[in-house]
Image: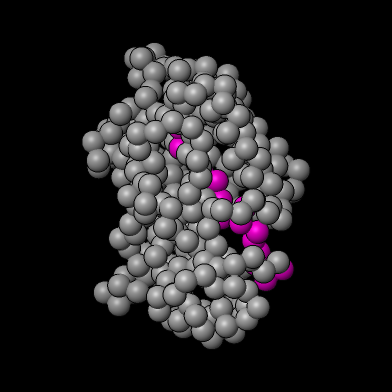
C-alpha cells in the first residue's frame, strides 16, 4: 500500500514509518516538523511532506496527491499527529488541536476516498490516572465505557465516537483506534529497575508501557486487517515495567479492585487479549530481555 502517516516525525511515528517501509509499503510522512536528521534521513520508500494538520485543506490535498508525488493519492491513512499527552499545552489548546486534527483526518480521508484509517487513541480513555480513580477491575480491557479525566483524554474518547459515526456514514470504511500505552524506546529501559522501589511512581497507568517497535507492529496489523467499521484496541506490552509480580502490585496498591482471572508473574494489567485475537498482535520487545542483553 501507499500510506500517509500524520505525525510521522514523532516518537512513535518515525518507528511506524520505518516499519511500514520494511514490510514493503511506501509512505509519505505528513508533519510540520521534518524527521530527525532531515528528510534525507528517511528510509528508501518514504518521503516527507510538510503539512499543517490544523489546515483541513492542506491535509486533504496531501491525501489526494501533490504534483508528481503520489499523484494518484494514497491507499490508507495512519493518523498519529497530535499533542501527545496532557499538560504539554493548556487544556483548551490541547482539546482543540487534537479534536480538530482528528476530525480533519477522518473527513479528509472520506473526501479522498481513503477507507482504511488507523489512528492513535490513548490508554488515558480507560480512566487514567488510576491513583485518582481506581479501575473498575483488572486487567482493564475495552469493555467498559471510556472515562476521560483530562481534556487530552476527552479528545481521544470523542475521537473514538466520531470514528463510529464516520463509519456509519460510509459502511465500507474502516477506522481503527489504537489505545497506545506509554511509548518507550530501548534506551529508556535502564530506568525501569528503579521503579520497583516505589510502585506509586508508575501506578498512573497500571505500570504499563509499549515498546515503539511493537506499537508500529500494531499499526501495521491494523492496516492489513480486512474488516469494516470502527473498533478500538488496547496496545501495550505483554509485561509491566515492574520486577514485582502483577498480583503483588494489585494486592498492595488496589486491594479492593477485582482481579479477573489468573495473572502471569509480570502480566500486563492493560489487557491485550482483544488485539491478540483480532489483529494477531503479539509483543516482541520486552524491556526485560533488552535490559539484560
Residue toward you, 11 or 137: 137
Place of residue 8 in the rendered image (x, y in percent of width and height, measured from the top left): 44, 40
Identify whether 72 is placed above or below 151: above
User: Is 128 part of what is drawn in magenta?
Assistant: yes
Q: Tell whether 238 sits left or right of 122.
A: left
- x and y percent of residue 162 in the render? 62, 33
**Residue 134 percent coordinates (x, y):** 67, 69
Q: Residue at x 31, y 70 (%)?
A: 290
Q: 278 or 224, which is in the foreground?
A: 278
Give 38 or 126, whichever is nearer the viewer: 126
Q: What residue do we see at 64% from left, 45% from top?
A: 157
Question: Is residue 232 within the magenta segment?
Answer: no
In the rendered image, residue 233, in percent from the top left (x then y), is placed at 48, 49
Most extreme residue toward the front is 261
From the image, which quarter does the N terminus lie in?
A: top left
Give the magenta part as a residue range.
Answer: 117-132
Count the numbered circles shown. Answer: 0
Q: How is the image coloured?
A: one colour
Task: Name which residue lies at 52% across and 17% down.
Answer: 111
Res 48 visible: no
Residue depicted at 35% across the width and 34% down the height: 226
Viewed as shown, does residue 205 lie left or right of 271?
A: right
Q: Quadrant of the C terminus?
A: bottom left
Residue 20 appears in view: yes
User: Taking 130 as reference, is 14 above or below it?
Assistant: above
Front-lying residue, 92 or 231? 231
Residue 90, above or below 131: above
Amino acid at each position: 500500500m501507499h500510506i500517509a502517516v500524520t505525525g510521522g516525525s514523532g516518537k512513535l511515528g518515525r518507528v511506524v514509518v520505518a516499519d511500514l517501509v520494511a514490510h514493503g509499503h511506501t509512505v509519505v510522512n505528513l508533519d510540520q516538523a521534518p524527521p530527525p536528521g532531515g528528510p534525507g534521513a528517511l528510509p528508501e520508500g518514504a518521503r516527507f511532506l510538510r503539512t499543517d494538520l490544523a489546515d483541513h485543506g492542506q491535509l486533504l490535498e496531501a491525501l489526494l496527491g501533490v504534483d508528481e508525488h503520489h499523484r494518484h493519492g494514497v491507499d490508507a491513512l495512519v493518523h498519529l499527529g497530535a499533542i501527545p499527552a496532557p499538560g504539554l499545552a493548556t487544556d483548551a489548546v490541547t482539546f482543540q488541536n487534537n479534536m480538530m486534527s482528528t476530525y480533519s483526518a477522518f473527513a479528509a480521508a472520506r473526501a479522498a476516498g481513503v477507507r482504511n484509517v488507523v489512528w492513535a487513541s490513548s490508554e488515558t480513555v480507560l480512566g487514567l490516572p488510576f491513583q485518582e480513580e481506581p479501575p473498575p477491575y483488572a486487567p482493564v480491557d475495552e469493555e467498559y465505557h471510556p472515562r476521560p479525566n483530562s481534556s487530552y483524554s476527552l479528545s481521544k474518547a470523542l475521537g473514538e465516537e466520531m470514528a463510529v459515526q464516520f463509519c456509519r456514514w460510509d459502511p465500507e470504511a474502516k477506522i481503527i483506534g489504537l489505545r497506545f500505552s506509554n511509548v518507550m524506546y530501548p534506551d529508556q529501559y535502564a530506568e525501569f529497575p528503579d521503579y520497583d522501589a516505589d510502585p506509586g511512581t508508575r501506578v498512573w497507568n497500571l505500570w504499563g508501557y509499549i515498546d515503539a517497535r511493537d506499537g508500529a507492529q500494531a499499526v501495521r496489523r491494523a492496516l492489513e486487517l480486512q474488516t469494516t467499521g470502527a473498533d478500538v484496541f488496547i496496545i501495550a506490552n505483554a509485561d509491566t515495567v515492574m520486577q514485582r509480580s502483577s498480583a503483588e502490585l494489585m494486592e498492595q496498591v488496589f486491594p479492593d479492585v477485582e482481579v479477573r482471572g489468573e495473572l502471569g508473574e509480570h502480566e500486563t494489567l492493560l489487557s491485550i487479549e482483544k488485539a491478540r485475537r483480532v489483529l494477531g498482535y503479539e509483543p516482541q520487545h520486552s524491556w526485560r530481555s533488552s535490559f539484560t542483553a
